Image: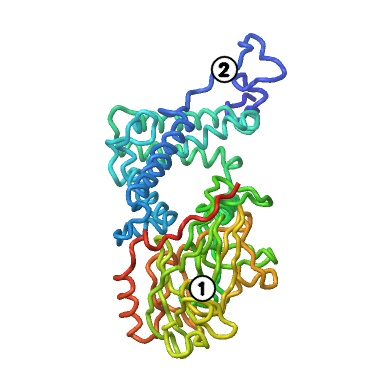
Amino acid sequence: MATTPEERSPESSPALAKEGGATEGSDPSPPPRPNTGSAGPSWLRGLFYAIWIVTLPFVLAILAVWLLTPAPGDVSAGGLRVFVAEQQIPAGIVLFTIFAMLAWHYRYELPLSSAIGVGRKDIPPQARARYEEAQALVDEARRILKQNTREVDKGLRAAERERLDEALRGLEKVMTAETFDLAEFDAAHTRADRAVGEHLSRWRKGEMREYAESIGVAVAVALILRAFVIEAFKIPSGSMIPSLMIGDHIFVNKLTYGPLIPWTEKRLFSSLPPTRGDVMVFKFPENKEQDFIKRVIAAPGDTLEAINGRPIINGWLVPHCYVGRYGSDGWLYVEYLEDKSYFTLFAHDDTHPNGPDEPVCKGQEDCGIGQSCKAGICGHHQGPFKVGANEVWVMGDNRYNSHDSRSWRGGMGAGVPFENIKGRAMFVWMSFAPGGGIAQDRLFVNVMGRPKLPGGLDASLQAGLDKCMRERPPVSQTTPPPGRKLR
């Protein structure tokens, strides 16, 4: 009994005989396959997306951040420019997302989009998603046919392969026609989708595999971001009160100083040292398993001293302004260091028994027993400490409740080596109040921005803060003299 083309085995079909010799009288060379290519190969469309949807928005975001960032020392900038200057990574991500969304929205209008099969300008808006699905279907079918040639030839009968090729050819013809016909496209798309699902389903990715790949990519991206871009930290102690409160959760920018390469002490794109006034996270030099957060006070080559917790850099007393009484046992100030303004908190003790006034002196004889005269102030003196190369010295904003450079090495003092630095603090993304619940007034506080008072304090403190910010000295008067040069 004669067999129909559908009943022939792949080995008996002259059109599919590729191994073991050709049928007598037939052409020994394999027959040409129908062209199922699109207007442009998939790699060319990938290059199109990489340029227009990734590279261009990335360049525009960098340019926008650069244009919006005020010049160093410009304290007159405000609003958006201050946010961009202090939060360049979040600003860049937001701007990149905006530019990428715009480019994606107008992708059909971009140069060469029609020529390489990304889209067509004459496609009705409601059909654009289906057009892209059809293009993805053709790309997937072409990939399967290329990567599994032998398996497909053995697994499909000649008639099945012909129906598949015909469906793909029909879809591509409609997609690349001079005039786009929506009805013909929908019909061709349905036929091709049915044919690919019927004949190539065993080689297509399963739903679980697609989920697993998506989860894998998401995890990989998260790990890369955590290692090189942004990492989250929780504030466990009160050493930075009130700039940072216990229960604050912050993001740290790991690109600022150059991210550490994992399992090494080398950095990518190093831009050290940190500038004075930066709030940074670092590995505690005496126990690298612990992460500390403090404010940079002295840079390489500086000589650091402290009188009553106030830093003296190269013989120059860092200026500050009295804000008001903080709770029942502290005095709150705003300290000015270079272009930074930030809170400092001093305990109600013998050095400040009745308020902010400090005992002044001209010489040691003006001070009591156990006190020193430094920078015209009587009080408890620490130092001098010499800041070496490849390190910075740090202090907590809560000056009488901070385990920082002044007390390390058994009170001899020590700096933070550059290789211990993890990154610069950005902003509070979550905060929990001591009694439970979310401290809403702490959300999105810019750690490096204008000082912001925590909620629940005396209203007079805000008036004191506003006064100190209005009367801020110019940067020329808040910058210490240069220290010794290091070789």
- CA separation, marks 1 and 2? 95 Å
**How many marks are shown on the rendered structure?**
2
Residue 133 x/y as whole percent: 42, 42
Q: Nearer the viewer, residue 56 or 40?
A: 56
Q: Residues within 10 Å of mark 1 (few under 14, many from 20)?
A: many
Task: Residue under label 2, please give it.
Answer: 31
The residue sitting at 34% across, 40% down in the picture is: 107
Q: Is residue 320 above or below residue 434?
A: above
Which amino acid does the dot numbered 1 rest on? Lys
Regarding residue 439, the answer to whether it shows in the image is yes
Q: Nearer the viewer, residue 54 or 477?
A: 477
Q: Is residue 335 above or below residue 271?
A: below
> Which label is found at residue 66?
none
The residue sitting at 33% across, 79% down in the picture is: 464
Describe residue 410's horizontal placement relative to residue 487 as left or right: right
Residue 116 x/y as whole percent: 39, 30
| Contact (Cβ within 8 Å) of mark 1 with mark 2 | no
User: Mark 1, mark 2: which one is toward the viewer?
Assistant: 1
Which amino acid does the dot numbered 2 rest on? Pro
Describe residue 23's horizontal placement relative to residue 347 as left or right: right
Q: Nearer the viewer, residue 238 or 403?
A: 403
Q: Secondary structure at mark 2?
A: loop
The earlier-in-sequence mark between 1 and 2 is 2
Q: Quadrant of the N terminus?
A: top right
Q: Seen from this angle, which residue lies furthest top?
A: 25
Task: Residue under label 1, please give it.
Answer: 374
The residue sitting at 67% across, 24% down in the picture is: 11
Q: Is residue 116 above or below residue 21?
A: below
Q: Nearer the viewer, residue 50 or 149?
A: 50
